[in-house]
Amino acid sequence: MSDKIRKFDTKIQHLKYKVLREVARQAWSNTLQETVLDIPKMIVPGKTPTMRCCVYKERAILAERVKLAMGGSKSNPNVIEVIGIACDECPAGGYEVSDACRGCLAHRCEDVCPRGAIRFDHNHVAHIDKSKCIECGACAKVCPYTAIVNRKRPCQNACKVKAIVINDDKEASIDNSKCIECGACVYQCPFGAISDKSYILNAIDLIKKSEGNSRYKVYAVVAPAIATQFSYAKLGQVITGLHRMGFYGAVEVALGADLVAMEEAKELAEKGFLTSSCCPAFVEYIKKGFPALVEHLSSSPSPMARVGRLIKEKDPTARVVFIGPCTAKKVEAQRVEVRPWIDAVITFEELQALLDSRDIDVTVLEETPMEDASYFGRVLARTGGLSEAVSEALREQGMETFDFRPEVCDGIEACRVALLKKSKNLLTANFVEGMVCNGGCIGGAGCLMHGEKNRSKVDLHGKDAKKQRIDGQEPSVK
């Protein structure tokens, strides 16, 4: 299938995909080590640049993308990294005086500036001395013409936990002590200068070692948000593509979501207050931003970890690869308590690259059904789904008299407000469903496509489930 009809949101995603696809191709053929330095030339042949000022800089940036596709810096524990050489086109940002300044006589901006950073030219028009400005915003607040604006970089606007800072070289830098690895900056950077590390080589290695080897089988654990992706094909065809690639089985993460909903409902009824544990970025946000609330975190593992544990309890030799929309899952899989159950994590972007690296055209394949989960397990992919599932789980376990008062948080800012209220004993809810990405998992940075229609697609996926109740029975995984 031609690259031109791929359904990527942005050209940056398409560029990232081409690098991942080529790295994967070389890995399948065992030629990666010999050809790794040639990959930038494969993507940008000739002497004509396609996006940058010169072909040499473009290839230098591609070389950095190749490194990220191969796992990135081992010394940096964060899965989100900045490609410094690619971060050079954004303006310095910060507070600036726009053309709306009328050169008034009041000079309120000058009066409130604590560092004397405001000066005026012969027309009384204000100017900000960047060497003195501390970005406090006091001048913008008092300007009667709103002529002073804060021009933040796209990555800084995207990062609601303020983990993006600008270093002395005017490049974006990530403060790991604040970063929750949600990937919002990855998706919003218009130059692709921020990207997530890929563990696509780990997945390929697992599959290659399992081929012709009866010692273990590799399972793909697929997030329900996949129903919103690969719009050019049917979901069952994509599942068949996974089998063609070498996966023994494809298991729906929603099966784990069913189990987690039952467990969280029971824990909530026992404790009286709970914050969800399904979104790893939300869990990380609580740990870093509201450590006093860690005691209220659900003790249930995420649906990903729950399914991985289920598979390996039934077959200890199995290997599990999670496929979903989330960059933070790559970090979750490295936690001590999750590491035994999940062997690798890739995103939907990386799955597209994997399929094409093996020249698998899913549009011509027959459909393969997935292990069936409930409606409630599947709708966890969008905001509000978990609260619906917990409510149903309370009812099914005979606890419908419990006064269930959920606070559904759509996006990191809503999460911050809810947690802030709880920290000040102002929250009336007794269950906080935290989804850091807007819309829930369907808004994850690793999605091929984002959009409002994805919510309805998830709901349709839920309605297609054979089970319309959770029932709490442990599913069979073949």
Image (spheres, rainbow, N blue to C red):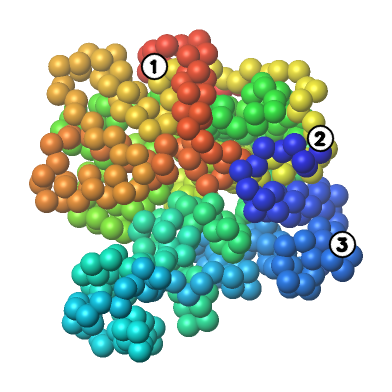
Q: CA distance from mark 3 to mark 1?
A: 54 Å
Question: Mark 3 near mark 2, Cβ–Cβ under 8 Å?
Answer: no
Element marked by disc 2: loop
Determine whether 159 is above or below 322 in the image. below
Most foreground residue, 72 or 337: 72
Residue located at (50% from left, 64% from top) = 77
Q: CA distance from mark 1 to mark 2?
A: 39 Å
Most foreground residue, 184 or 248: 184
- Residue 415 placement (x, y as % from top left): 29, 46
Question: Mark 1 near mark 2, Cβ–Cβ under 8 Å?
Answer: no
Residue assigned mark 3: 45
Instruction: Report the mark closest to the observer, 3 or 1.
Output: 3
- Residue 399 placement (x, y as % from top left): 20, 17
- Does label 1 or label 2 sit earlier along the sequence? 2
Which quadrant of the view contains residue 177? bottom left
Most foreground residue, 394 or 285: 285
Query: Quick one: label 1, few (<14), some, or many (20+) residues within 10 Å?
Result: many
Q: CA distance from mark 3 to mark 2?
A: 21 Å
Residue located at (61% from left, 40% from top) = 448
Q: Amino acid at mark 3?
A: Pro
Q: Amino acid at mark 1?
A: Ile
- Does label 3 or label 2 sit earlier along the sequence? 2
Residue assigned mark 1: 470
Element marked by disc 3: loop
Quarter that holds the C terminus: top right
Element marked by disc 1: loop
Left or right side of 31 for 164: left
- Does label 3 or label 1 sit earlier along the sequence? 3
Q: Amino acid at mark 2?
A: Met
Which quadrant of the view contains residue 433? top left
Quarter that holds the N terminus: top right
- Residue 364 placement (x, y as % from top left): 80, 23
